[in-house]
Amino acid sequence: MRLACAHASMGDKAESHRLLGIAETQFGRGTRDDDPPCVGWFDEGSLHDQAAVCHADLGDLRRADALLDKAQERFAPTRRRDYATYLIRRAQVQNDLGNADHAADLLHQVIPMVEQAPSKRNIGRLLAARDRLPKDARHSDLDQRLSALTA
């Protein structure tokens, strides 16, 4: 999956898609007894999230959004930080699709999650996603909430 994402970030659609297929096939086979323990964190939500990253990098925003929707449906409830990351990524995709208000709504949903499960990476992602939204009065409440979060 990491190789698929790397190729997607370089715009290599064919190789990224080939590697995504391999990753999905391997994931579908399940874990093996000799897998390292760290493999356990990579669940179905992670699979959809990472595939969405590839599709977003390749410009297929609708596919990325659909995969992020699946990631949200399948996240492990104990993984609040991951869920916040999925929402932030989805907000970025929604904004890129021209749905800035929906993107802002998603970012509003993330703030309590980051307050409950603080993460410097997610705060950085949240601020970066906000910076991509239009700078207008409709998002002043979001700006206030973010300001309080980072104070």
Image (cartoon, helix red, strand yellow):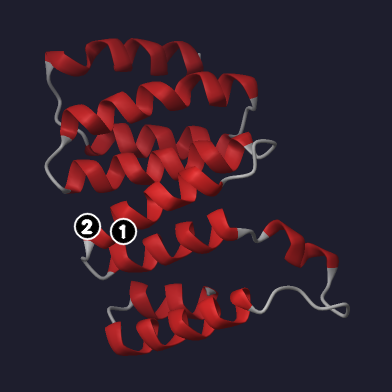
Foreground residue among 19 and 117: 19
| Relative height, residue 105 to residue 98 (above, below) | above
In the image, farthest residue toward the right: 33
> Which x, y percent locates residue 10?
32, 78
Dot label at residue 64: 1
SS at circle 2: helix
Foreground residue among 110 and 9: 110
Give the crowd class for mark 1: few <14, some 14-19, many >=20 residues within 10 Å: many
Q: Who's the residue at 55% across and 26% down the image?
A: 114
Determine the image quadrant of residue 146: top left
Name the amino acid, label 2.
Answer: Arg
Q: CA distance from mark 1 to mark 2?
A: 5 Å
Q: Who's the residue at 47% across and 51% down the image?
A: 71
Foreground residue among 149 and 111: 111
Give the crowd class for mark 2: few <14, some 14-19, many >=20 residues within 10 Å: some
| Relative height, residue 145 to residue 119 (above, below) | above
SS at circle 1: helix
> Which x, y percent locates residue 53?
39, 61
> Which x, y percent locates residue 19?
46, 85
Dot label at residue 75: none
Name the amino acid, label 1.
Answer: Ala
> Which x, y percent locates residue 61?
22, 58
Question: Disc 1, disc 2: CB below 8 Å?
Answer: yes
| Relative height, residue 84 to residue 148 (above, below) | below
Query: In the image, is 83 to the left or to the right of 91?
Result: right
| Relative height, residue 136 to residue 16 (above, below) | above
Q: Who's the residue at 88% across and 77% down the image?
A: 33
Label 2: which residue?
A: 62
Query: In the image, is 109 to the left or to the right of 34?
Result: left
Query: In the image, is 26 to the left or to the right of 129?
Result: right
